[in-house]
Image: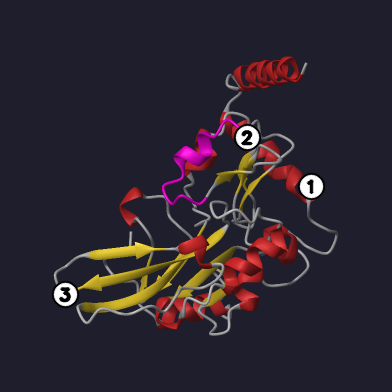
Amino acid sequence: MENENNRRNFLRKSLYAMILAFIPPSFISGEKSKKVVEWIIGENYNPYDHYWSMGIDINKCIGCGRCADACKTENDVPREPFFFRTWVERYRIYQDGDVQIDSPNGAVNGFEKGTESKNIERSFFVPKICNHCDNPPCVQVCPVGATFKSEDGVILVDKNYCIGCRYCIQACPYGARYLHPETRTADKCTFCYHRLVQGKLPACVETCPTQARIFGELKKKASPLERFRRMNKINVLKPALNTEPKVYYANLDMEVK
């Protein structure tokens, strides 16, 4: 009986995807974007008044992993070591040019100090997160419009529409998405959108002990994010892909992928 139900659900979702494939993506995205107000936003928040972004200062990150742990707690992310909305990678560059990258359990428990080799030229930590691109490939490939870009620049997933096809997971060049094991829908960082609409910071930003993460609005001169961009040499991940990421890094090493 369970196999029969699974088969019916699969066929239903497949048929739904085939029908929606003939609907213009621009129409779907527009309709989904209009519904975001009803879906999650309260009466006191107007998405047209904001355009959110995040900055990360590599020199300030100490690899404590509090951001990753806070994210899992705040957003009910499964505790298994392969489900993350945000994680931290450790880069170790050796004198012979070798590069080692690790992120045990996404750095939720931090990193073991261990015995450092004398041949290490430099070592640093790099927080990773959904880049909330202005030209998001995940939105382009979604056959049902479940993944969409809101008016305030945040890439969101409507779980009521997502059919779990994994197209967006494959399309994301930053590895920032996963299929939730319980809902069987795509999941990712939302900048803690449920907190933003209440005037709060994302959990990862609020919990960072060194203020390595800076959150704010683009195009507003008084925004902490705009001050961060003015005062630092800024880079983004994989700029050649033209996804136009809205997560900006200061002091980003050229070895970071």
Residue 255: image location, x then y, percent: 27, 65
Picture residue at 71% right of the left edge, 18% below the top = 3
Disc assigned to residue 95: 3
Residue 22 seen by the camera: yes
**Residue at the spot of label 2:** 145
Q: Which mark is residue 99?
A: none
What percent of the width, then of the height, locates residue 187? Answer: 62, 47
Mark 3–mark 2 CB contact (< 8 Å): no
Quadrant of res 74: bottom right
Q: What span is in magenta?
A: 164-176
User: Between marks 1 and 3, how big is the CA–CA gap?
Assistant: 52 Å
Q: Give the alpha-carbon distance from disc 3 to disc 2, as whole Å.
A: 48 Å
Task: Determine whether, in the image, residue 65 is placed left or right of residue 32.
Answer: left
In this picture, is 197 found above or below 14? below
Between the C-alphas of marks 1 and 2, the distance is: 15 Å
Task: Write down the quadrant of residue 53 in the picture.
Answer: bottom right
Q: Residue at x 29, y 64 (%)?
A: 100
Q: Residues within 10 Å of mark 3 (few under 14, many from 20)?
A: few
Q: Are marks 1 and 3 in contact (CB under 8 Å)?
A: no
